[in-house]
Amino acid sequence: MKRQAKQPVPSLSLIALTVAALCQPAAAADYIWQGGDGQWLDASKWTLLGVPGAGDTATINFTSTGSVDLHDTRSLDRLTMNGGRLGGNGTLNLGSLVFNGGALGATSFGSGGTINVSDATTFNGNGAQDVALSQRLNLNGNSTWTAGNGRLAVDGAYSAGNTSYPGALLRIGTGTTFTDEGAASSNGYKVLGGGDYTVINEGTYQRNGLGTTWARGLDNRGVLNVQSGIFAVESGNWLSTSSGQVNVAQGAELWLANTTFTGGSINNAGKVMVIGNDSHVQAAASISGQWQIDRGRLFVQGQQRIGAFTLNGGDLTGQGTLTVDSLEFNAGKVTNPSFLTGLRLDVQGTARFDGSNLLRIESSAQLQLNGNSTWTAGNGRLAVDGAYSAGNTSYPSALLRIGTGTTFTDEGAASSNGYKVLGGGTATVVNNGTYIRSGLGTTEAYGLSNAGLLDLTEGALAVDSTLVNTGTLNIRTGTMLQGLSGSIRNDGLLQGDGTVRTVDLRHALVNAGTLTPGSLGSAGQLQVDGDLTLLGAGALRIDLAANAHDLVNITSDMRLGGTLQIWASPTLELHTGDSFVVATYGQRLDGSTFDQVLWLGQGGNPFSVEYGDHALTLRVTAAVPEPSIAMMLLLGLGVAVPVVRRRR
């Protein structure tokens, strides 16, 4: 019988090393999904023939379609998504995420899963990433979306059969920063989101770099910093909101559409531009800086104050008051949203209105001009709506008010045959300052109320019967005040050397204020092409000077009444028999005469008034002291020369 060889016995030291090795924690492994569809728990789908765990990293690479389904709770140190889809309704807790391409989200209709990232996340700005269906991606560490012209999509809500499902969600957590490094070039763009309120920022969204980021469905509850380039909340069917803070740096731009500011503030050193749909600034929010509307509607509530404001189209609406430093009104409307009292726009500085376009102030909205303004030359229209009713409720007219101490310069029409239109309803354009009408052609004004100075320096101003003049209407040589409908009425001071033309011979220039050729204290000739009616409450002022005197030429009928005021220059020498023709007319109606004649010159009244068939003549019928003697008598006796105060 053969003797067996004796087996060696392991030493104690070797046993100890083996036990120690078995007790050591396993080293972190790098797992790679091998492709195709499958379950996360299918070890055969991973390169190491196991399932990645909490300390491991995993990479999902797909060059074509394919999906990994996760239906329980798992943890990883890092996940790299290079393509394909990671779906299911499970929860994945990550230390970090590198998202270069592919999709996170359910592979079919149903509730999505959740991915929580505790540390850094990197999104490839040149790629296409999708947070799909009802998936949740929570970023609880600082994140970077690199520069590029890619897309980080977040799907909106959807329905399957009779069941509705919420949209996907990308949430930037409190205390974290999401850095958007912009597009690939100044002309490039990238896209974020895709559904209503699908991107929630509770931390800080930092927009840097070039080009434009188009955001679809942003809910800003934290801080949005637009440091450079353009951050654009895109027009379309995506709704966005902000209750947090928005900072727009100098040179940067924020574009808005379908955005509601429910609170917080916009600290704007750059520009905010409305590009479409409806955007709202609620009373609890605060805005500032330069704003512009190109398309869409901006609703303003409460008391708001900004810098420069440009209206290139669309509507400025709401029921609040917007105070601006300056206004550029090129197209569009200042209005209100429905049958309500309209918005008030107060301009503290300069305003410019494009005379070649249609500009509207509608539905009881008000535009107050507290600085100098210019309405450029053109054949456009600055329309101001009249009062209106809705059901049993009446609403006031819209209003354009030119403030006291300011100048509104109307630069006329585009050509001598052209015309532009102002106003539209009774008392809708109120001038408390100075309205200068210059340039070519005609301005047709409807509903003009003048309590300041209306100065016609060039061209023509055509007015309808709603004209109210309680201020000064100055018609210079070569200019015309023309009637559009009804009679032209003056309750203030109407003066000048130009022409007043009535709409036809059935209507007249009706004076219940002061009518004088030239200007107060200066002789001139005023032409009335049509009829002139002098009411009992009014006065015709005639200035007499050494070498000239006032004259009113009326082509048709004249009806006298009121007061004839005769003002004489202190240097005027009068002699018995001297005569002055102060008015000519086609005929004097019904034998009418003045109610009274006031001589406001030297000594007693030396005149008689001769009412001719076609002329009104003043004739000297009594001796008058020499001017120098008369002035010495007045000064020596301390006699005050009477002064008629100009009515406003």
Image: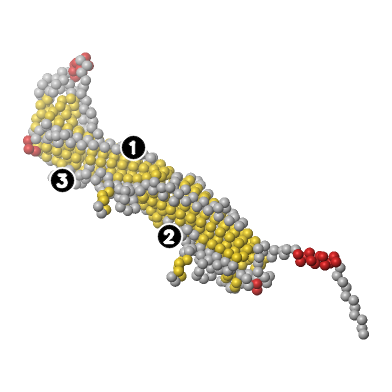
Taking depth in this image into account, of 4 and 514 the one nearest to the observer is: 4
Q: Position of residue 350 (x, y in %)?
A: 38, 41
Is 136 placed left or right of 349 in the picture?
right
Q: Which residue has dot 1 on it?
A: 406
Q: Position of residue 169 (x, y in %)?
A: 51, 61
Question: What residue type is disc 2 on?
Answer: Gly
Q: Residue at x 51, y 67 (%)?
A: 111
Q: Which residue has dot 2 on it?
A: 236
Say the numbered circle drawn on residue 504.
Answer: 3
Taking depth in this image into account, of 245 and 601 the one nearest to the observer is: 245
For residue 187, say whether it is visible.
no
Q: Quadrant of residue 41?
A: bottom right
Q: Position of residue 251 (x, y in %)?
A: 50, 47
Q: CA distance from mark 3 to mark 1?
A: 35 Å
Return the disc, 3 or 2, that comes first in the chain's sequence: 2
- Helix, strand or loop for disc 1: loop
